[in-house]
Amino acid sequence: MIILPAGRRVAGARPFLVGMFVDALGSGLYVPLTLLFIHHVTGLPMTTVGLGVTAAAMVGLAANPVAGALIDRFDARRVLMATYVLRAVGFAAYPLVDGFAALVAVAAVVAVGDRAYYPAAGSYLSVLAQGADRDKLYALMATARNVAFGLGGLLSAGAVSLAGGAGFTLIAALDAASFVVATGFLIVSGRRASVETPPRQSKGYREVFADRPFLGLVAAEQAFTLTHMILPVALPVYAVTVLGAPAWLMGLLYTLNTALVAAGQLMVRRRQRDARRTHAMALAGVILIAACALYAATALLPAGPARVGGLVVATLVLTLGELMHTTPSWALTAATAPPELRGRYLAIHQQTWAFAAVIAPGGFSALLGAEPSLLWVTLAVLLVLACLALLHLAHRLPPHAVAAPEA
């Protein structure tokens, strides 16, 4: 059992978190090398791999709403187990791919598992714990996943450097194994926990889309998820091509961000425990606006060490904003959702990340190409609107969802 403040215990939480750590460790093995990994394992040309992965990602977009309906119809743990099984099968099948159609089929299986994982994991966690315990578990989940992603990236680099091309096949096998192990831990978690079974009901997405305050929360969340795309999507282009920063700096900034998120999530959560969740998110938005301003101001610094220092400072502020946003965002959404529709609510909330992944590459590139400062101004304006919306929603969302979680 996981022991939380005041001696409370959350049955089933420990095996769930361990399984989730193993899952993230496996994901960390291939995410940094996705296209290169598939190219080496399948032997297909890189252009074919790119088209196949794009097609599979489009299929994956539909996974969130479908997963939400399945979660509400059955239960979150079963759907979460299915996401592990899908990805285990997908990675075991990658070495057998010999053409474009097979690539799309296997990559789509993995993409569906990846996208459906998040609403399923969030829904299962939300029935394991309530109130402050739930917030603590969300923080623990974020911490563990970041640590596991970082370790997975290091193991991936080691496998490729030591085994060469064979290292990619080894990564495929380890990925498949990691999801099998995660499934086992999830089975143990279900045996230890008393998880509510959602009542059979005829409600569907119509009820979700009729909840206007929740839709306002989703709209505000979209500004935050777009801002989370700064580090992986916008910053490499802005720093290297616009500011002339060295390419190696991107790896350093990514590592710094990952390490600080892993180390700081629980500490930040403790600082937020007396704050209303809407207000905690709004404050995170103010910090992210400051990060956008610092990134824009870095262009005014002299080229060389000064700009490198400016990018580091801006990234530190960005990381703080991300830390402050993550736990209250997940917890607010889970608490807003009626239990019988929690899967659908979390699926729509999670879809903001899917849309951000589609919008950010082209949209950010277009803004940077037209005028670099436009990107930072656009994100800052979106965040201002999101912060104002959150303060307004504090009086429209369910009071128990907005209120500071009971210690």
Image (cartoon, rainbow, N blue to C red):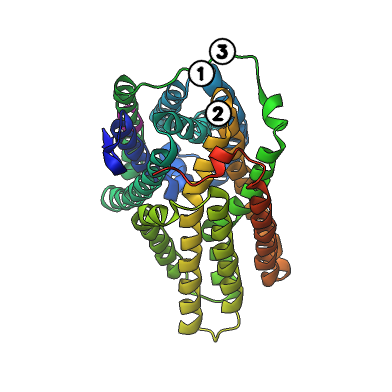
> Which amino acid, mark 3?
Arg
**Labelled pair 3, 1 in contact (Cβ < 8 Å):** yes
Q: Is residue 394 magenta?
A: no
Q: In which quarter of the image is residue 80?
A: top left
Determine the residue positioned at 53% across, 54% down.
280
Q: Judging from the image, what secondary structure is the residue with disc 3 in?
A: loop
Q: Where is residue 192 in the image (x, y as percent from the top left)?
A: 29, 23
Q: Position of residue 168 (x, y in %)?
A: 36, 42
Tag 2 residue: 342
Q: Which of 126 and 35 is in front in this view?
A: 126
Amino acid marked by disc 2 = Arg
The residue tagged 3 is: 200
The residue wearing badge 1 is 198
Quick check: 227 above or below 340? below
The quadrant of the rendering that contains the N terminus is top left
| Separation of marks 3 and 1 at Cα, in angstroms | 6 Å
Judge from the rendering whether residue 15 lies leftward or rightward of residue 228; answer left or right: left
Identify which amino acid the numbered label 1 is placed on: Pro
Marks 2 and 3 sit apart, C-alpha to C-alpha, by: 13 Å
How many numbered circles does the render carry? 3
Give residue 7's position: percent from left, percent from top: 26, 39
The secondary element bearing badge 1 is classed as loop
